[in-house]
Amino acid sequence: MFGFNRVKKAAAVATATAAAAATALLSAPAAVAAPQPIVGGTTTTTTAYPFVMQITDASQNQFCGGTLVSPTKVVTAAHCMVGESAGSVRVVGGRTYLNGTNGTVGRVSKIWIHPNYTSVTDGEDVAVLTLSTSMPYTPAKYVSASQTSVYAAGTTARILGWGTTSSNGSSSNQLRTATVPTVSDSSCGSSYGADFVRSDMVCAGYTSGGVDTCQGDSGGPLLIGGVLAGITSWGEGCAQAGYPGVYTRLTTFSNLVTTQLNS
Ligand code: ARG
């Protein structure tokens, strides 16, 4: 079993950070890498990516990302919504900075979690939130069920989020983005064994690591050709060589998402 990143709550990440950093310094000083963005990448804004949403608690503390796919529907990860209720979460649009107060705070009237979801390594890591009011931002298009060729190995994909900038690091106050190549299913299967479920997951990252999503990025978008094609789900550590990020393979769930958009 791998030591997967399943830390969801920003608070939990913050609490764990000091202890983990101290442990890392004590046990492996030479292996402590300089913190990098998202891991790897650059800062960006919700003006550039208006469909990228912060998923927060009722106090507007961000713990996951999401993607606006219609004025009142947001795609995120099922694992982000475990233990949550409609009243316990908010969707914040148009807010580039975690410590900002601008943008639009949306209340949630319904949380749909894939009915078969159990754990990230079993797949079905998709959820759709229905907002009580419309978001005044341009939604993203998402892949249709038939567009399975978008994941061809080596295709450039874009990741976005406010997650930690290194494994066990701290979150980024500003939205970050990076590009990573998709990885073939056979290669990802070699990395993760039976935990990689081809029908439900797609991997992206460089062989040598260095660029990846990390804790707090979950639920956010993997864009291919500017279209939502994946949802940040899991990985072994972050940005490690030989362990690409794993994303929900959205073509598999596209029709279900559409059903939620029309419900
Ligand atoms: N599970 C993490 C989250 O909840 C996302 C981890 C992604 N990890 C990776 N190596 N790409 O935010």
Image: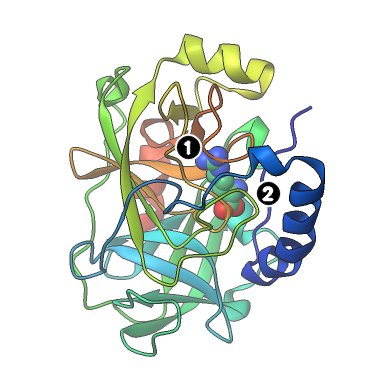
Of the residues shown, which amino acid type is indicated by label 1?
Thr
Taking the view exactly as shown, the residue that stands out farthest to the front is 30
User: Picture quarter containing residue 5?
Assistant: top right
Per the image, the residue denoted by label 1 is 248
Left or right of 88, for residue 106: left
Left or right of 117, for residue 211: left
Q: Earlier in the sequence, mark 1 or mark 2?
A: 2
Of residues 128 and 164, the one drawn nearer to the viewer in this rendering: 164
Task: Specify the quadrant that holds the N terminus.
Answer: top right
Q: Please tell me whether mark 1 or mark 2 is closer to you in this view.
A: 2
Q: Circle 2 sits in a helix, a strand or a loop, which is it? A: loop
CA neighbours of label 2 inside 10 A, class few (<14), some (14 to 19), many (20+): many
Question: Can residue 28 be seen by looking at this rendering?
Answer: yes
Ligand 1 closer than 8 Å to the CB at disc 2?
yes
**Alpha carbon of mark 1 to alpha carbon of mark 2: how far?**
15 Å
Of the residues shown, which amino acid type is indicated by label 2?
Arg
Residue 4 point in image, percent of width and height:
69, 39
Residue 43 point in image, percent of width and height:
30, 61
Residue 163 point in image, percent of width and height:
50, 59
User: Picture quarter containing residue 22?
Assistant: bottom right
Residue sitting at 33 percent across and 78 percent down? 95
Residue sitting at 19 percent across and 70 percent down? 47
Per the image, the residue denoted by label 2 is 6
